[in-house]
Amino acid sequence: MLNNIRIVLIETSHSGNIGSTARAMKTMGLTNLYLVNPKQGIDEQAIALAAGADDVIKQAKIVPHFDDAVADCSLVIGTSARLRHLQNSLIEPRECGGKAINAAKCGQIALVFGRERIGLTNDELLKCHYHLTIPANPDYSSLNLAMAVQLVCYELRMAYLAEQDLPVSSIDNSNARTNSMATAQELEYFYQHTEQVYTQLGFIQNQGVMQKLRRLYQRTALEKNELNILRGMLSTVEKRIKLVRN
Ligand code: SAH
């Protein structure tokens, strides 16, 4: 299960934080690290702070964009200290541990961490199903990046260990659902399709509507077959528009 969970770091400035993240992950049994456009490469500082977890950084996948790191994931969880406006999708580390371990029985899961100075952008947050916030001191809530990773990975490990005691049948039941969850890339195509069709119809005139729709659909955790129905509905509307125009 832990092999299906990846830690994604977005545009990290300090290579030392990449090393410390690798160490934080490996102590908790995680090894899949994605680096999105890191500002410094893997250097001596990173290796030094990895303290023996250099295998994790050496096999890290370096990709140019957020989308490349999460395309095949059926669950994407973004992290930030400033999330109060996203009430509906807000979770804390303990709940996140359970959700991620459950979903990792079949699908790929991404936990996304932001830039040291500015965190994640609103666009990036919109692409996440859930938003994790560590309930820190409200007057001083921003943890060091690798320490935030450590805390989240600890909860993943706790949820993973708790799962080991469960009877096999309860694991099988949830497989059926996680197996068929839509991936981030399939959802992206669906959002593009929705925007295209409803812009043609004149219903969508600004980005606000798409942002609200994204939040709505992310919350519902769509399965592949449900997404196919929605895509089918959009295609039918598209055909009608063409007929009317011709
Ligand atoms: N000034 C930035 C802080 C970034 S800290 C901001 O306000 O967003 C770097 C990263 O560590 C964050 O993007 C997030 O991924 C993680 N992080 C730090 N503190 C956190 C907290 N309290 N809850 C969740 N994630 C946190």
Image: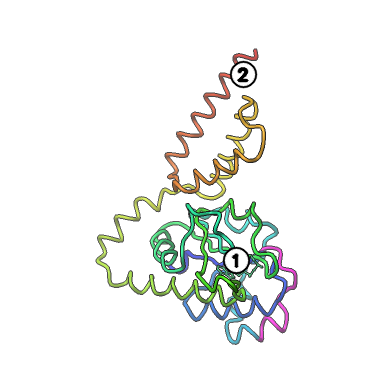
Compared to 19, does 78 lie above or below?
above
Asked if the magenta segment contains residue 37, the reply would be yes
Q: Amino acid at mark 2?
A: Lys
* Secondary element at tag 2: helix
Which residue is at 52% across, 24% downward?
A: 236
Badge 2 density bin: few <14, some 14–19, many ≥20, Cα 10 Å: few
In this rendering, the answer to whether 30 lies above or below 120 is: below
Gap in angstroms between the C-alphas marked 1 and 2: 43 Å
Drawn side of residue 221 relative to residue 39, left or right? left
In the image, which residues are magenta?
A: 36-48
Task: Tell me which amino acid carries mark 1.
Answer: Phe
Q: Quadrant of ligand 1?
A: bottom right
Q: Which residue is mark 2?
A: 242
Residue farthest to the front, as pictured: 139
Q: Is mark 1 within 8 Å of ligand 1?
A: yes
Check disc 1 and report its element: helix, strand or loop: strand
- Residue 16 lies, in percent from the top left, at 68, 80
The percent position of residue 182, horizontal first and vertical second, equals 48, 47
Q: Quadrant of the C terminus?
A: top right
Q: Is residue 217 left or right of residue 39?
A: left
Total numbered badges shown on the rendered structure = 2
Q: Which mark is residue 113?
A: 1
Q: Quadrant of residue 63?
A: bottom right
113 or 232: nearer the eye?
A: 113
Q: Quadrant of the N terminus?
A: bottom left
